[in-house]
Each structure stands twice: as structure tokens, then as C-alpha cells.
Image (tube, rainbow, N blue to C red):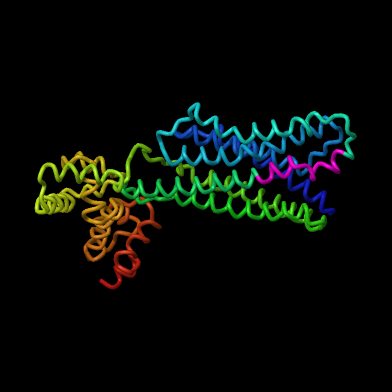
Amino acid sequence: MDKLDLLQGIGRISVFVSLLLAFFLLTVKTENKLANRLFAWFFIFSAVDLSGFFIDAVTRTALNWEIFRSTACLFGMPLFYLFVLAVCYSDFRLQWKHLVHLLPFIVVNLVFIPRIYLNLDTDRDTFVAALNQLPEIYFIQILIEFQYLFYIVSVFLILKKYREIYLENYANSNAATYKWLFQITCVFLIAHSIVALKNLLRYSGFREIFLWANVLVGSIALFITCWFIMKALNHPELFRGVNSKLKLTKDILPEVEDKLTSTNVQDDLISSQISTLKQYMAEKEPFLDPSLTIQELANQIDIPVRELSVLINHKMDQHFFDFVNEYRIQKAMNILKDQSKSQLTVLEILYEVGFNSKSSFNTSFKKYTNLTPTAYRNAS
């Protein structure tokens, strides 16, 4: 098969699969409809971009439309960025200010008007030959790289903050959402690095290598899209957001410490609060609730949530996530050592102590004991 035919075939399949995934995301029932819609539009514009592999602009007007279509790639990363925000933060909503993300697309097409869109007096072959040498084409390629770098860094920063907020305020041991988004972002970073190298070959004079590089890029796009479909079908629960208004302990620490100082709160009182907290955890076992949050625990022991956050995350030098899991692991260890409960499976035990994921339980258990649950039971 000719490499051009292969490229066009891969392109058509990639477009079909992208549109299929977009349809699935737009129609599947979920609480986080905004995230699904943003991701669906991401794949719609990806399909528009991938269609360039097999669309042949045979007329001058069609060529103008083809150039306009190629600028649609500038929607990709803004949509992915907004999608990550919508997944991470349950209270995220689109606002008028988000229209600023359209700016690169608008600027590029305005720049293209004088010498590309309105340059109708040039025959097609002459125009195509000179197109790749125009400063406007260099401009869009440079802009795409800067735009990609800006959004990829922004997404990693969002995920970093999301993880910190999650660890300080939530005790649900299932971190699948963070891991999935981190994986997606890393895959996008690797894929775009390959695309950037492919684009450099455009000006190298090695046409054969450039064509094969296009085949590789098309194959990668198809693989990534199929991977997303498998994830969406097998893990529909991945959309779990946190409240974006929650503040990190380092941000509220000065305010809380000033309050403690102004009311002459001494270290022995802080120690008393810690002792009361530990006693409550041991006696009432609130950690058995797999969805326990720091707000719920603060309500139960009648301590302002900000003070409790500083108490656990700063004074006790533990994330709320680790603080709660330590009690879960201790209870699991007691059950594993109890000969009268030897009939219980590890899966039954992890659900009983407040975990809802076997992988998370095994990871946390090994972190505290350096043994797997099964090895610990056998050694007891």
C-alpha cells in the first residue's frame, strides 16, 4: 500500500473514532455534563484537525477553507484545559471571561486575511508552492508551540493543586481521577513532542521521512483516541471533583495562627486538641466512612474546619488523607491478626475499614507495614 493511501486510511479511521467518542460523551448519562461536553468538543476539533490527512483542496476557494480548518487546532489545548478544570473542581462553570481562550484563533485568522484569504489573484499551484515560506505560516507554528507550552504547564499546575487540596481535605482513597488526568497530560506531552519533531522535517527536504512521520502521528492519534474510549467505557466514575473554594493549609495558616495568638492559646491546649481528636478517631471510628471529608470531621468534633486543617496538616505534620488512612490500616492490621476473622478475605476487610479500592489499600498497607496484607496475615 502507498504511504499516502495508508495515511489517508488512518486519518479517516481516526476521524470516525474521534467523532464516535464525542457522540458517546455527549449522550452518556453523568453528573458532570460540562466536563463531558468540553471533552466531546475537544475530540470534535481533533477530528477536524485530523481530516487534513485526507482532504485534498483542489480549488483556490477550497484551499482557503482548508487553511481556515488548519487553524482549528488552536481550540484543542484550551478545551483540554477547561475540561481538566471541570473534572477537578465540581463547582467549575464556564464564564464570559473564558472567551479569552479564543484569542489565538482570532489573531491567527486576522493575520491570514491580507496575504492568504484575500490573495485570490494567484493561481493555486503558485500559491501552494509559496505558502510554506510565508511569515504567517511560521507565525502560526510558533504560536501553536507557545500556546501548547502555556496550557500544558497550566494543566500540570492545576493537577498539583487538585492533589494537594484532595489530600488535605478528603479521605476517599480512590485517586483514579488524578492518575487518569496526569496520564492523559503526559500522553499529550509526548504526542505533541513527536508532532513538533515531525513539523521540523517539513523544512528538512526529506519528503519521504516527513510522509512516514505523518503516518506515525496519525497512528498515535488513533491509538490515543481508542485508549480514551476504553477508559470512558471501563471507568465512567472518573469524574470526581473537589470544591475549588477550599484553601490549602499554607494559605490559611497565618490567619489561624494570628487568631490562636490573639486568644492566648498555648501549646498545651493544642496538645489537648490533638489528644481529643485522636481519642475521637479511636472510639467513634469516623474513618470507616470511605467518603469522609475534613469538613464532616470538623462538624463531628465541633472544631472550625480551618483550625482542624491546621491542626492535622501543620501541627501533626500529616495530610488529612494520610491521617485517616493510618487509622484504617491499624484497624485492618487488627482484623488480619484476629484468628476469629480469618475467613474474611482481603477484599472484604478493605471495604470494612473504609477503603474502596484494592490497589489503594495495598499501596497504603505496604507504606505503613512494608508488607502486603496477605504477607502480614501469614506472618501474624
Asked whether 180 falls inside the magenta stretch, the response is no
Q: In which quarter of the image is residue 12?
A: top right
Q: In this view, does 145 lie to the left or right of 293?
A: right
Looking at the rendering, the stretch of residues picked out in magenta corresponds to 127-142
Rendering coords of residue 173 (x, y %) = 35, 51
Q: In which quarter of the image is the N terminus?
A: bottom right
Chief SS of the magenta region: helix
Residue at the image position 19 percent from the left and 43 percent from the top: 258
* Residue at the (79%, 39%) spot, across then down: 55
Residue 140 lies, in percent from the top left, at 69, 41
Q: Is residue 137 inside the magenta stretch?
A: yes
Q: Which residue lies furthest to the top in this view?
A: 96
Above or below for 96 versus 193:
above
Q: Which residue is drawn at 49% across and 32% down?
A: 33
Q: Quadrant of the C terminus?
A: bottom left
The residue lying toward the viewer, choosing from 380 and 283, is 283
Counting from the top left corner in percent of width and height, residue 303 is at 17, 41
Q: x%, y% of residue 138? A: 72, 45
